[in-house]
Amino acid sequence: MSAIGFLTQLAYQITARSESGAVPFLLLLTIKVALLATACAMVMGVTAVFLLNRKRFWGRDLAEVALSLPLVLPPTVLGYYLLVLIGRNGLFGHWLHARFGLSLIFTWQGAVLAATVVALPLVFKSAAAAFAEINRRCEEAAVTLGASELTVFLRISLPMAWRGILAGGMMAFARAMGEFGATLMVAGNLPGRTQTLSLAVYDAVQAGDFQQANFLVLIITLVSTIILYSSGKLLQNGWR
């Protein structure tokens, strides 16, 4: 098939599938989940780096291991841990339901939580590396002038490390967009409610609808490629 024919067929599929309403919902839900998860991961990751770099306490190394653990654990294992924590009979889930009548299981909010846990190590590692590259003399000079640790962090350290943090955030967004295992365990695979692009690809393959699977895979691949390229450029320009 020629390139022109492929692009023509792709454009036709985009138009036809967009008119059905299913693909726009999948894309919007996936982006919403990924954006919220990335925002949470960035706040938690940067805060964790600040606390671990500025404070010395027992268990610091264990905290770093715990923050990095989602990088190596299977997503289904992470999903199981989340179920134990936030399930109806879980440690936190029981209190949440008894106190507020809320449940995160089989909701898009649960998908955000699962994606946050999976994406957090990417922000944490990138932020830690970015802060390690900062010239400590600038921070020390600010401290001698009477600036507090928080002021130094917000006005000196954070602006100097923004490229690495942003690159980590972009990687976290791409990871959150492609999350499957933990999301399936926590939020389920409910079309029109919690089904994201990755889950829809699985359903399409199971149903033998390879045109739909190809289309969805192409969307995820294009977005991920753009993010990886952009984050790489940010890191090269910032740490060259």
Image (cartoon, rainbow, N blue to C red):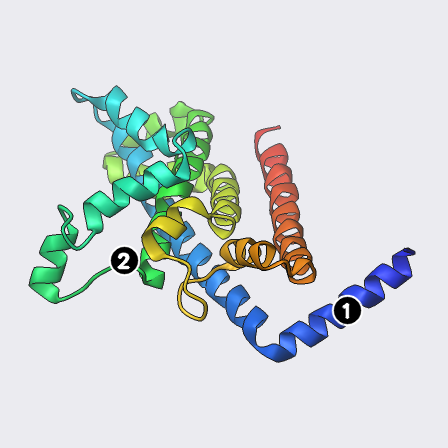
Mark 1 surroundings: few (<14), some (14-19) or many (≥20) residues within 10 A:
few
For residue 238, the mark is none
Foreground residue, 121 or 87?
87
Locate residue 76, reporting x and y percent: 38, 40
Q: In terms of sequence position, does the residue under pointer 2 or pointer 1 come before the other?
A: 1
Kind of element beneath mark 2: loop
Q: Residue furthest front?
A: 207
Q: Is residue 60 above or below residue 4?
A: above
Locate residue 27, reporting x and y percent: 54, 65
Locate residue 215, reporting x and y percent: 67, 60
Foreground residue, 95 or 51?
95
Q: Quadrant of the C terminus?
A: top right
Q: Are marks 2 and 1 in contact (CB under 8 Å)?
A: no
Question: Type of residue at label 2?
Answer: Ile
User: What is the quadrant of residue 131 in the picture?
Assistant: top left
Q: Is residue 147 visible?
A: no
Q: Is residue 3 visible?
A: yes
Q: Residue at x 17, y 22 (%)?
A: 57
Mark 2 surroundings: few (<14), some (14-19) or many (≥20) residues within 10 A:
many
Q: Distance between the Cα atoms at labels 2 and 1?
A: 37 Å
Residue pointed to by mark 1: 11
For residue 105, the mark is 2
Number of marks drawn: 2
Q: Disc 2 vs disc 1: which is toward the camera? A: 2
Locate residue 36, reporting x and y percent: 39, 57
Q: Quadrant of the N terminus?
A: bottom right
Left or right of 167? Residue 233 is right
Question: Type of residue at label 1?
Answer: Ala
Left or right of 207? Residue 191 is left
Foreground residue, 216 or 116?
216
Kind of element beneath mark 1: helix
